[in-house]
Amino acid sequence: MATSSIYDLPAHPPPPGVSAQIGHAPNRNSTTVGVISLCLILSTIGVALRVYARFFVLRKVQLQDYLMLLSFSLYVTFNGLYLNLVHSPGWFVHIWDLTLGEFVDFLHYGVVATSVFLGFYIPIKSAILLEWLSLFVPGGSRRSIFFWSCHLILWANLLFCAAELFLVNLACTPAEYAWNRTIKGHCAIDTGYTSLSSSIFAFVTDALIFFVPQRIIWTLNMTWRRKLGVSVVFALGLAACTASLIRLYYTVQRNQGYDLSYRLSSVQLTAVGEGAAALLVFCVPATPKAVAAIRESRLGKSLLPWSSLVSIIRRHHTPQASQESSQHGDTAPYTTLVEKTVGNNQRWQGGISSESDLIPLSTIPSAKMKQNHVDMNAM
């Protein structure tokens, strides 16, 4: 084991004409904390609404809901690891502004967080694909290209992430050598290439998950406006694709220079956004059920006078829009609330931006029910 004095030395000499600022290096900690906090807030709201809709409103919990909870716990975990970097050594700090000890700590957090992130990707992408299957192929009623595509992506993601976890943690002997090169050891493979392959695979699977359901959505017998409304919900997948593409770009940049602490900060921060987008892709379609139920709860009814006042004001200032809406008889999604009573139990079939409003079963011809059936109560 190296002596403690080694860890007080600079991690890397500064480039020509640049002075090291060890101990008071500039950083972007405040920006990073803001981004992580925003992603945690949005994902927490999405998960909470999904849990409320599935566990308390519909009372229909499926495997993907438990996978979501597992994913969310892992997401919070690796964000907690990243927040610890704010204290030492900091975010977006150049390697020549760090001591060797600080750089070793930074890499250690990075290796652990990468393992947690790979673990996060297994259940969240599995949950999204299982949700697609339960929504568009209920009960596995039709072994279509869509069905097999979802299964192919699901199992490929599981096997790839498991292999990456194995390589990240067992590539070096001893394992500590992966983040601490002051000790004796060796690595069987370059972990930089595993990071690059992971980024490429993440982008490809995110793109496939977004595009696979689009064909079914646009072949449903619905108005163009309703199809667009559904596509907007699923278009959250574009955010995940964008984040994974940016992460791929920064991963390539990271492998082309020695300033690892600065370049890895970009990779890690885009991973935070990518994870939040994946959670929202899964949770947002179930949000309308929760919103409709909340509006009909005691809290929602207590706010009803205020919402009515806002509606009156809006109608007063936009009479032309109200007349056009009534003349065309076409309402946008997220506008109706239908209560259906079965025995002594109430089931909210519609509601503000309810799933049945987004993809109403009545719009699907009976001749195509088996082909295009969508079980919106599975949301």
Image (cartoon, rainbow, N blue to C red):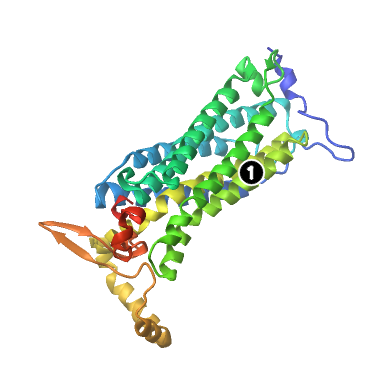
Q: Which residue is mark 1?
A: 247
Residue 93 appears in the picture as rendered: no
Residue occupying image coordinates x 45% and y 61%: 218
Residue beneath the point at 33% across and 55% down: 373
Q: Residue 179, image x and y in percent?
A: 65, 24
Residue 366's place in the image compared with 266, above or below, is below
| Quadrant including the N terminus | top right
Hey, which quadrant is residue 366 in on the image? bottom left
Type of residue at label 1?
A: Arg
Residue 308 against residue 107 in the figure, above or below: below
Would you say 164 lies left or right of 148 here? Answer: right
Secondary structure under tag 1 reads: helix
Q: Of all residues shown, which one is farthest toward the front?
A: 367
Residue at (33%, 43%) from the top-left corner?
140
State the residue in front, 237 or 111: 237
Q: Quadrant of residue 308?
A: bottom left
Q: Say if 109 sits above or below 69 in the image.
A: above
Q: Is residue 155 above or below residue 333?
A: above
